Image: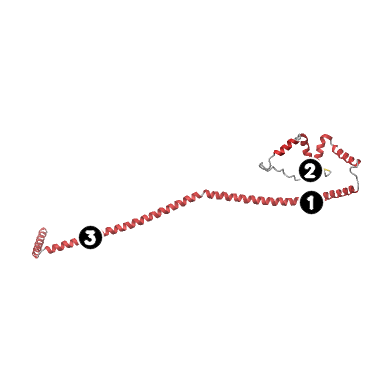
Amino acid sequence: MLSRLVLRAAPAALRSPAPPAAAAGVLHATRPLHTTRQRPAPLPPLPEKGGEVRFGLIPEEFFKFLYPKTGVTGPYMLGTGLVLYLLSKEIYVINHETVAAACILSVIIYGVKKFGPSVADFADKLNEEKVAKALAVKNEAIQDLESAIEQEKKEQWRVEGHHYLFDAKRNNIAMLLETNYRERMLMVYNEVKKRLDYQVAMQTLKRQKEQDHMIQWVEKNVIQSITPQQQKESIAKCIVDLKALSKTAQAAV
């Protein structure tokens, strides 16, 4: 992986001019520390599979980098020449450790070829289980947040409808107060009417008693003022009037 990064960064490093040391020092000296706002950089997606390699070790990018300059056989000749140079100059000496390394490398390659797919499947299964658990937790959190959002919207809708409820309650209270006021006014009216009727009845009774008393007093005085002679004369006159009336009635018949 590091060799691939080096090979990819090498052309860009060769094309771009290197800054002078003084400028670099000034740049580092004048750069503010922890003063800029941190922004999350976009993370590249992780590759599901590794890059292509040759001979199980050398990346494909190495060969593609040398193809334009050395041709198709250039990388192989470079590797062969480098090995022959190391052996001829005795920079690397073949000994028993080389045989042991070759044996160990052969065992490792055999183990990778033999048990690699099963181990990879097991690792992929574990990774899928972890991803499934993470997705389950994520989906559950999303559902909880969605339900919380719906609940919040419902509460906001209820809050928006509170003024209608308050208006209805105010109207009910106003109606109750008006009803109570009218009941009290009716009670006052009835009480006042009862008292006025009592006063009218008292005055009527008083007037009737005064009239009865006046009539009795007048009758009593009139009777007392009549003498026995006047009574006899009035009785005689009444008898005469009755006789005259009887004669007039007989004549009419």
Label 3 or label 2, whichever comes before in sequence order = 2
Colour treatment of the image: secondary structure
Disc 1: CA contacts within 10 A as few (<14), some (14-19) or many (>=20): few
Element under disc 3: helix
- Residue at coordinates 37% horizontally, 56% vertically from top-left? 184
Q: Position of residue 44 (x, y in %)?
A: 72, 43
| Quadrant of the rendered image containing residue 89 | top right
The residues bearing labels 2 and 1 have C-alpha atoms spaced at a distance of 24 Å
Q: For the residues carrying marks 2 and 1, which lies nearer the camera in this image?
A: 2
User: What type is the residue that disc 2 sits on?
Assistant: Leu
> In the figure, 111 relative to 3: above or below?
below
Which mark, by number, is residue 2? 2
- The residue under label 1 is 119
Residue ID at (77%, 36%):
13
Q: Is residue 98 left or right of residue 32?
A: right
Callout 2 crowding tier (Cα within 10 Å): few <14, some 14–19, many ≥20: few
Q: Is residue 85 left or right of residue 234?
A: right
**Residue 236: percent from left, percent from top:** 8, 63
Dot 1 amino acid type: Val
Which amino acid type is marked by label 3?
Gln
- Quarter of the image with the N terminus is top right
- Residue 209: mark: none
Q: Quadrant of residue 60?
A: top right
Left or right side of 33 for 155: left
Instruction: Pick the residue in front: 241 or 4.
Output: 4
Establish if 12 lies above or below 50.
above
Quarter containing the C terminus: bottom left
First of labels 3, 1 by sequence position? 1
